[in-house]
Amino acid sequence: MDEKKITGKNNVVLCIVSVVILVLLLFPLFWTLITSFKTEKEIFMIPPTWYPHELNTKSYAAQIENGDFNMFKSFFNSFVISTGAMLIAVVLAVPASYAIARYKFVGRKAMLLGFLVTQMLPVSVLLTPMFIMFRNMKIYNTWWAPVLADATIGIPFSVLILKNYFASIPKALEEAAYIDGCTRMMAFMKILVPVAKPGVIVCAIFSFLYAWGDLAYGMTFILDQEKRPITAGIFNFMGQYGTKWSYLTAFAIVAIIPVTLIFVFMQNYIISGMTNGAVKG
């Protein structure tokens, strides 16, 4: 009986701690949301207000007004860049992770270490060499530049995640496919990739999100405003003589809508994919 009481108290404490952590994590999003509906005068009131006393919707209307910055065009640009980076990352990472997991070859550990190191490199270190490469390749100021740059972020992450999936698949399953007449490529595509589907989906989602949230590559490698991704639009509300905070926060809310929808509708795949990869590794 005492053990049950202790267990119950522990559960209550854990629930309270979880709620507190959740509130702390969601508070910045809440503050951004209410700020987007405030007037510029109310934003700087002391003490601050916890809800907009005067509802301001002009900040959201400004997002779709015609001008140098077009919200719908920027959304399309981000979608093209993010989708391209995701496809490149998945197409290259899936066979690479299979080879690393299944075969023993010289330099295998060094290759894995290289993938880990690339995850630690700051973007500022990579901008200059990438700029020179893309300019020489004649793809500077095109979508290809940020697509390839963002793919360099998704590929190492995807390889490290998928390696555990392929390593956990029994070799007998692959050998059975050979006995049934499958070639190595057929067995890989029809047997191994479907088994590793949760991991592939997780890698695709995170590669897409990495590219969607990128600002440095999109600003550096694309000069034309009409080609830039949605994240570059943040500078349209930051002027020389001040910042329109209601417009800026409204832009932030609109920009994260696709990310929110992905997490809402794909959360089962994300959770299963991450947990399976952690356990099977």
Image (cartoon, helix red, strand yellow):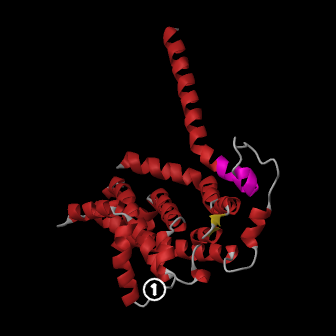
Tell me if 221 is positioned left or right of 58 in this view.
left
- Residue stretch rendered in magenta on the structure: 30-43
Residue 239, percent across and down? 62, 70
Query: Which quadrant of the figure has residue 121?
Result: bottom left
Prevalent SS, magenta region = helix
Amino acid type at mark 1: Tyr
Q: Is residue 156 above or below residue 18?
A: below
Query: Which residue is labeled 1 in the image?
Result: 140
In this rendered view, identify the residue nearer to me: 54 or 181.
54
Indicate whether residue 131 is drawn in magenta.
no
Tell me if 58 is positioned left or right of 85 in this view.
right
Residue 122, percent across and down? 37, 63
In this rendered view, identify the residue nearer to me: 220 or 186.
220
Identify which residue is drawn at 62% across, 44% down.
27
In this rendered view, identify the residue nearer to me: 87 or 58.
58
Identify which residue is drawn at 75% across, 45% down.
51
Labels in figure, total: 1
Identify which residue is drawn at 58% across, 28% down.
16
Q: Is residue 36 above or below residue 14?
A: below
Dot 1 falls on a residue whose secondary structure is: loop
Q: Which residue, as the protein is rendered here, is positioned at the far left?
A: 106
Residue 102, percent across and down? 28, 62
